[in-house]
Amino acid sequence: MKEIRVIGMVIYTYAILEERLEELWNWLKQVEEWSGRPYAEFNFSSRTKESFRIWKATEKNRTNLYRRLHVEQPWSDLHLGWPRGTLQSSVSNTKGLYVAIGSSCQPLHGGESYRSPSDIYLGVHPDVLAHSATGVSGLLELGVQAWEIVDGVYGFIDVETGIPLRDDILRNAIHLFDSTVPKEYEMEFLLWMHARSELDKRVWKAFWGNFLGAEHLHQLGGIEEMRRADPLYRRLPEYLEQAYQQGRARLRESSCYHEWRDLAHGGVLLTLSESPLDWFEKQVQERKACLQEVFGQVALGPWDYDRYNLTIFRKEQE
């Protein structure tokens, strides 16, 4: 039986989220307004102290949380949910809403190759999406706003139909190695973990919604080919502009999407249909396959295996 269990949206960034606290706090309020559901509970951990306590989202507790976010910096995780029980269960079970903000050290070990992205995640049950104030358009607007707030580098809107959502793959690792999950997902997990420092250049695959940064368009437009053709292997401004325009043109000409939205800092958002609830429609799946083919040169895939092994070797030598 074809069933959509959860719609999940994630925006990745290498920015320091503690510096964007006021904007993020206002964004969390907009999620409430869009869903029409006030948060029932939350959990918060600082970088120095992990907490498993779940607090009721009373006005007093939310005020105290706001103060703690200013004081206990740097912090690592903030989780909010509706209805009560969501943070200990799942959105699919409670038919609710879950928001998570994960803040990572930037960079993790002092170099760009060790960057570990921070992320903003919003997961909702299909019922919440269907009865929200502005529906899918409002969900997309929340994504656009999150992208601007944190200077997003990559993101997507995923549809869970059994395989766990890919918001933060670490949270779902136990599921990926479960016997009910296809073996190819194990290698996909390993590849993803070692591509996290390159999310501004690489994409996971084609999702229902795809947030792409300017660097993705540079890569799609052939910036690396231009560099290799240059005697000094440079990324000249004229190369970047040409590659960017060629990347946009390649996406435009493919027609492998339903809607195109321009994002801040030269990014684009592509969706496959009017709603993620259309996921099983033939046309949506055809667009997904088409877009995946366009993403080929910058998406994770079987051809990454040797590259993955080389990455492991290099880090072991450092």
Image (cartoon, helix red, strand yellow):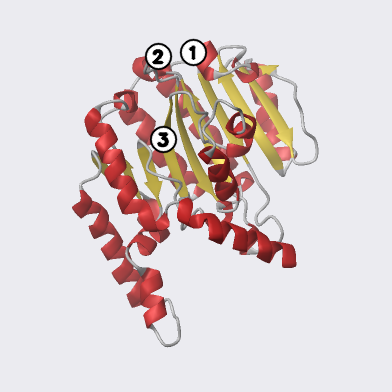
Q: Are marks 1 and 2 in contact (CB under 8 Å)?
A: yes
The residue wearing badge 2 is: 127
Residue under the point 67% across and 66% down: 314
Residue at the spot of label 1: 95
Binning the other alpha carbons within 10 Å of mark 2 as few (below 14), some (14 to 19) or many (20 upward) gives few
Identify the element where label 2 is drawn.
helix
Residue 67 x %, y %: 69, 32
Which numbered disc covers residue 157?
3
- Say which amino acid is labelled 2: Asp
Q: Which of marks 1 and 2 is nearer the N terminus?
A: 1
From what the image shows, is residue 60 above or below residue 49?
A: above
How many neighbours does mark 1 have within 10 angstroms: few (below 14), some (14-19), or many (20 or more)?
A: some
Residue at mark 1 to residue at mark 2: CA–CA distance? 7 Å
Residue 267 in sight in this render = no
Q: Which of disc 3 and disc 2 is earlier in sequence? A: 2
Query: What is the number of the mark on residue 214?
Result: none
